[in-house]
Amino acid sequence: MAATNKQWIVENKDKGFDGLVYKETSIPQVGENEVLVKLEAASLNYRDLIIPKGMYPFPTKFPVVPASDGAGEVIEVGSKVTDFKKGDKVATLFNQGHQFGSIDIPATQTGLGGVIDGTLREYGVFAEKGLVKAAKNLSAIENSTLTCAALTSWNALYGLKPLKPGEYVLVQGTGGVSLFGLQFAKAAGAIVIATTSSAQKAEKLKQLGADHVINYKEDENWGETAKKLTPDGAGVDHIIEVGGAGTLKQSFKAIKYEGVISVIGFLGGVDPKTQPSVVDTLGHICTVRGVYVGSKALMRDMIRAIEANDIHPVVDEKVFTLSEVREAYDFMWAQKHFGKLAIKIC
Ligand SMILES: NC(=O)c1ccc[n+]([C@@H]2O[C@H](COP(=O)([O-])OP(=O)(O)OC[C@H]3O[C@@H](n4cnc5c(N)ncnc54)[C@H](OP(=O)(O)O)[C@@H]3O)[C@@H](O)[C@H]2O)c1
């Protein structure tokens, strides 16, 4: 075993990406309920970029090892660990305290890479409850993309009102959450309407199985356009809402009566003055649901579905190494990526 452990640290929330520091430390000791993992890959989420910028709305602590998403191999287990053994391939759970059912207040304070040290390091000790067995059909890089974006999308489609074959799903943009939404929806036999700002990305969306693609920059009224694409113009059953104030208005135009808008992100910003109000849910007879990643039980369901359908996450062709994490943050902030942006660790 190597004697040192290279890792990234976010020192505070005031310096932006300059607050990211690459350090050499020692390999942590394993407690009785803990597992030592040699991390093989990690992937980034928009959330990882906004933590050092002080823009993340959930609990954080500083200094913290950043990033929630990771996959690797078990090197050592504590004396009371029963679910894992040396050599197992594992992936990390986002909210380590969210084991099953509804999330509670304590579990919202157990986010990996926010409150608990995350995955941008060579070796990490994790609580046994904070790991899952990796998907057998996926590489380490692919497995490292499942923790946050994939599980959030799965929770949106299956956590409240499970998606049915033949239903319509709308996904926004070509980020990690939306592309998982597209892949899960297609595997379930749903019809997918995808939006993007780029003609080039539209082609890639079609290759991934999107049935309809709308350019949201060219068609500002894309919500109505999406609705017209559904049978009898009745609307879309599920919307993966990642845009925030700018997109929510259009999502209301697209949603079907009794459909579900899963509010996941706010890439386009938040504006209480212009965004729709709670009363709009009555006007459109729909459910608008905030989603915060998902439980370990949901993650296991998702991994079973990924294996059964041989779904492979969309990973940007540009893969960074652990020492290049700063460059990876800049690349993702500039929205140069398509799907997940991965970091190869070993
Ligand atoms: N609630 C949760 O549990 C949870 C979990 C994961 C992520 N999130 C949030 O979900 C959002 C998406 O995450 P992600 O990891 O998928 O992000 P990402 O990979 O950074 O997504 C970037 C893509 O989103 C699209 N986009 C940007 N602004 C947009 C806008 N105004 N309208 C529509 N699309 C827009 C762009 O697609 P095109 O280039 O194709 O236009 C862009 O390439 C973030 O806000 C993130 O914080 C929340």
Image: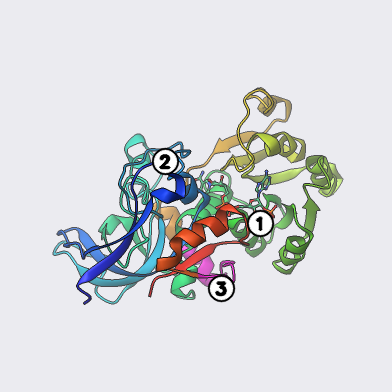
Q: Secondary structure at mark 2?
A: loop
Using a 10 Å C-alpha cutoff, classify the residue at mark 2 as few (fewer than 14 neighbours), some (14 to 19) or many (20 or more). few
Q: Label 2, on which residue?
A: 102
Q: Which label is found at residue 310?
A: 3
Seen at 47% across and 71% down, the residue is 141
- Whether 95 is drawn above or below 183: the answer is above
Q: Label 1, on which residue?
A: 174
In-image side of 215 versus 310 (left or right): right
Using a 10 Å C-alpha cutoff, classify the residue at mark 1 as few (fewer than 14 neighbours), some (14 to 19) or many (20 or more). many
In the rendered image, the quadrant that contains the N terminus is bottom left
**Amino acid type of the residue tagged 1 in the rendering:** Thr
- Precedes in sequence: disc 3 or disc 2: 2
Query: Does the stretch in magenta take in 301?
Result: no
Seen at 63% across and 59% down, the residue is 336
Q: Does residue 247 appear in this view?
A: yes
* Residue range corresponding to the magenta coloring: 302-319
- Whether 5 is drawn above or below 51: the answer is below
Q: Secondary structure at mark 3?
A: loop
